[in-house]
Image (cartoon, rainbow, N blue to C red):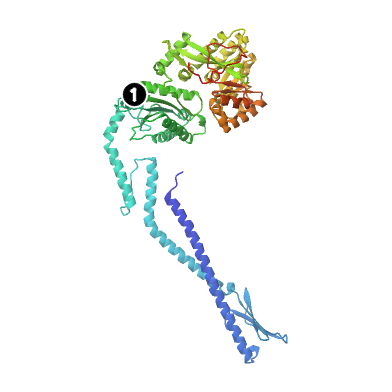
Amino acid sequence: MEMQITRTIYSLLLKHLAGIFCLAIVVFNVSVFYFANSSLDRQSKAQYNYILHLHKLDLRAEALNALTPDILAVKVINKDTGLSKSKVFGKSWHTAQDVYQYDKLTILITRKSVLSGYFGHWVLFNLSFIIILLVALMFSHYDVYKHWKYLIQLELWAARFAKNNKFKFYIKNKDYQLINSIRELNKQRVDAQKGGQKADHFIRSQTFLDSSTSLGNRLYFEHRLDSVLQQDDKVYGAVMIIHYGSLEVVKEVGTEQEMQDLLLQFADILKNYVDDTAQSILSRISATEFALLLPLVGGDEVEKIAINVLRMSQKVRLPDYVDSNTVCHIGVDMYDVDNTSFQIMAEADMALRAAQLHGPSGWFMYDSGELPASEIRGSVRWRTTIENALEFNLFNMSFQPVVNGNMRINHHEVLARMGDGKGESISAKVFLPMAKKCGLIPEIDKKILSLVVSSLEPNSPSPISVNIHIDSWLNREFCNWLLQFLKQYKESAKRLIFEISEYELAQHARKLSSVFAAIRRFNVQLMVDQVGLYVLETAYLDYIQVEHLKLHQSIVHRINETPENQMFIRSLQTVANEKSISIFAMGVESEQEISTLKRMGVKGLQGHYIKRPVDHILPANDVVEIDGDNLDL
C-alpha cells in the first residue's frame, strides 16, 4: 500500500512534539523541585543560626519562635547532660528533619518537606506551564496548517488522479512553486492529449488499438513487423508472444474489475521493454496474449528478457483460485531479412505451444534452422496436416536405446515423427504443441501405440517406452480405448512402459490413480519423465505406483561439475529406494557424466552420446558401443 506523505510527516511531528512536551515538563518539574528544596534549606539554616544566637544570649526556650511557617518544631539536646529542650510550632502531613551539630549541642529542626511545602505551588505552576504550551502549540498549528493544507490537497488530488488520470487539477493557490509546477505539467499533459485526439480517433476507428490497454492490437503489430522487415538496413531481432493463462481463469471465474486490474499489471510489466530508440513494439494480440517486437537483439538478450518477464509476472498477486504455477508462457522466434511476418508469427506461436506443453510457466525458442519452411504454417493448416497424417498413416518411429550400467540395452524409447504429405518429416517436438492446440493429441497417441505394437517382434523381449500425454490421460474416451487395446494385446502390453511428465502427474495424481490402477492389471510399467525440471514434491508416489523415474537433462548436464544436482539425485534416490523405484537419466552426453551417474547408482542412461535413435529394435541385453561425439547423421 502506498504511503501518504502528509500523514506520515504529521504522525512523525506529533510523536516528536509529544516527546518534546514530556521532556519540557520533566525539566520544568526538576527545576521547581531544585528551587523549592533550596528555599527550605535556607529557611532551616536561618532557624539554626537564630537558635545559636539565643543560646549565646542564654535566653529561655520560651523566647524561641519559628522564623517562617515552614518550620514546624525545634529540639536542642545537650550531649554531656542528656537534657533536651523542644518547642512545636505547627504540624504538616509530610515533614523533613535537618540535624545540626554545634559544640556540645545537637539541634534538630523539623520542617515541611518539598512536597507538603510547595504542593499548591507545584500544581499551579504545572497547570500554568501546560496551558502555556498548549496555547503555543495551538497557535503554531494554526499558523502551520495555513500552508500545510495545500500539501494535503495536493496529495488528495494525486490519489484521485492515480485512479483516474482525467481528474481535474482543482488547487487554485498560486503562492507555492511546487503547486504551480504540477499545475503547469498537468496542463501540458492535457494539451498534449487534446492535440493527439484526431490521430487517436483515426487509429481507434481503424481498430489498431486495444481498448482495454491502449496498446496496439494484432493488426497493428503485424503491420509494424512488415515495416521492420522491409527496411534496407540490417534486419534481425526477435518476436516474443506472451500468453497469460491466469487471465483466462480470472475471465471465467472472477469479476470484470479483477480481469482488468490483472491485465493492466501484466501490460505494465511488458511496457518496460518498449524502447522508442530501438523501435520495439508491444501489442495485445488476443484476450490473453501480448506480442513484443524486439529489433536488433541477439539470443542471449532475448533469453534474459524472457526470464525477467517470467520472474516479474510470477510476482503479481493473483486471486486464490488461480494456479500460480501457470501464470505465463512465452514463445520466441528469432527473425532475419529472409522471413515473412506470417512465418515469424506462426513460428513464435508454435514455440508458445511448445512452452505450454512443457507444463508450468516457462518459455521456449526453437533452435536456429530447426524448423524448415514447410513446417511453418497457421493453426488451420496444422490441423489439416495432422488430420491427413492420421488418415493416411504418415507417422513413423525411431527407437533410442536406453542402457543400464553395464552398457547393455535395458529398453528403447519411441521417438515419433510425422510426414506432411510433401516429403518432409516433422519431429514430435514441433507437431505436438500444435496438435495440443487442435485437440488431436489423443488420436496421435492412439496411432503411435498401434504402430508400436505392430513393430514388436514376438521373439524380442526388449521393453518399449512410449510417451502418453496428459491430454490423453484426462480424456475418458482415450482411457476406455486404451483398456480395450491392452486387453486385446495382453502379451505386448507386458513389454510397454508408459511415460508421463512429472509436472502433469503431480497435478493430477489423485484423479489418475484409478486409471493407472486399471492399466496395471495388464502388467504395464510406468515411468515418470522430466524429473527435476520443476521443483515438485514426490507426494504423487503415494497415490500411484511407478517403476521408474527419468531425470531431466537439465539435472544430468555436467552432473560431474554440479554438486547441487548430485545432492538432488541422492535425495531422490532415498525416496526411490524406499519404494523400489529405479532411476534413469536422459541427455547423457559425456564419459564424465556416465561415470558420475553410475557411481551415484543411476540404473539407466540415455542420450545421443551413448546411442543415437535407430530404425529398428535392438535385441535385449545386447552390449552397446557408444556413439560418442560423432553425431553426423
What residue is at 44 percent from the left and 53 percent from the top? 9
* Quadrant assignment, res 453: top right
Residue 401 lies, in percent from the top left, at 57, 16
Tell me the crowding category of disc 1: few under 14, some 14 to 19, or many 20 or more residues within 10 angstroms, Cα based: some
Label 1 sits on residue? 337
* Quadrant assignment, res 73: bottom right
What residue is at 60 percent from the left and 74 percent from the top? 113
Q: Nearer the viewer, residue 400 or 42?
A: 400
Residue 11 lies, in percent from the top left, at 46, 53
Rendered view: 91 above or below 296: below
SS for dot 1 = loop
Q: Horizontal placement of 162 versus 588: left or right?
A: left
Rendered view: 120 above or below 577: below
What residue is at 37 percent from the left and 43 percent from the top? 161
Rendered view: 601 above or below 20: above
Rendered view: 349 above or below 63: above
For the residue marked with disc 1, what is the amino acid?
Val
Q: How many labels does the image show?
A: 1
Residue 207 lies, in percent from the top left, at 32, 27
